Image: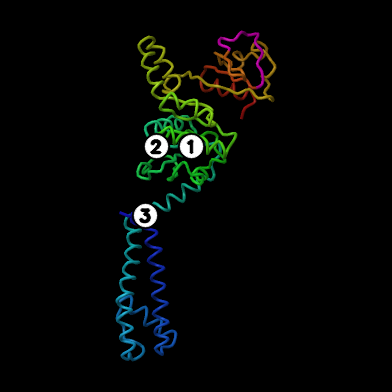
Amino acid sequence: MAPMPSPFRRVRIGLVALGLVVVAGTVGYLALGFDFLDAVYQTVVTITTVGFTSPVSLGSGAKIFTLFLILFGVGTALYSFGAVLEVVIEGHLREMVRRRKMERDITRMTGHIIVCGWGRVGREVARFLAAAGRQVVVVDRDGARLGGIAYPSVVGDVTDDDTLEQAGIGRAATLVAALDTDGDNLYVTVASRSMRPDLQIIARARSDSSEPKLLRAGANRVVNPQQLGGDRIAAFVTQPHVVDFVDVVMHDGTLEFRLEELDVSTSSPLAGNTLRSVRLHDQTGVLVLAIRRPDGSFVTNPSPEIVIEAGDVLIGVGTAVQLEALAQFAGLP
């Protein structure tokens, strides 16, 4: 069975049909000898069933034409008025206003995160990012699943370039592909990479065989929730207190300390200096736990004599105030 047209489409259809009936009625009465104003007047009062006295005495031909106009025009007018009432009464107009405001909000965003797929994984990703103060735009093809969510959203097929454009992919910092199937995530990864070669893409994989395909398609990182879940269960068996501590530091926020990463740019005063010479701990209070080199390797528990290079990523632990001081010391906004 074909789906019913949307309420707004029914309103457009009704108004167009009503306009055509008015034009046809006016032309018909003009042909029957009415002047223009009387023809319009007679048409409107006929199709609206107002029933005022005709401004011109109706002959047999005019009466027959009026009967046909009533049969077609009254039904069209009722259809149009019913469609308008449906939009107003069922809240579609309010939803349209909300959606337009949301679209304007998205157009003003920059550096936001696009979360594709509003399933269990997508919901957790959005919740964590919002708690971290990041702007999130959710995309899902099922409008019912997006009803009432607290984040700006786009209803549409995420494998469609137009949908990604509506989500602001041209200004986004990261796209998270968290759709239900690996095939959809692969397609979104390819489409997003072709539209934004510099975009960071994090993709979800359900099977081990999909991980290398997603990486070849352009994903910067691939996450297998099943594998992570198994690793986490095993970690609780062997090191439950360590896992609890890391969870609290990374996700809970109840501890004063937290982990953070900081990119070292070529213009940073840290670049080219040793940890001892910049006296990071003395200046900011942050303890540097590791340094990730541009080639992806890690230097854990770095020596004070190690040289910080442009392109390094410092991983440190400290309070929010100390981490903010580190960002300012490193020349970040």
Amino acid type, residue under disc 1 in the picture: Tyr
The chief SS type of the magenta part is: loop
- Find residue 102 and report its horizontal and vertical position in percent: 46, 47
The residue mark sitting in front, 3 or 2, is 2
Question: In the image, which residues are magenta?
Answer: 299-310
> Residue 293 at x, y = what percent?
61, 17
Report the amino acid beneath label 2: Trp
Contact between labelled residues 2 and 1, with CB atoms less than 8 Å apart: no
Callout 1 touching callout 3 (CB < 8 Å): no
Mark seen at residue 92: 3
Query: Disc 3 to disc 2, how far (Cα)?
Result: 22 Å
Name the one closer to the observer, 145 or 222.
222
The verdict on residue 228 being magenta is no
Q: At x 59% / y 35%, what residue is drawn?
A: 197
Q: Is residue 273 above or below residue 199?
A: above
What residue lies at 37% left-to-right and 32% top-to-bottom? Answer: 120
Q: Residues within 10 Å of mark 2 (few under 14, many from 20)?
A: many
Label 2 belongs to which residue?
Answer: 118
Query: Residue placed at 55% from the left, 36% from the top?
Result: 193
Amino acid under disc 3: His
Q: Alpha carbon of mark 1 to alpha carbon of mark 2: how far?
A: 17 Å
SS for tag 2? loop
- Residue corresponding to mark 1: 187
Give the structural element (helix, strand or loop) at label 1: helix
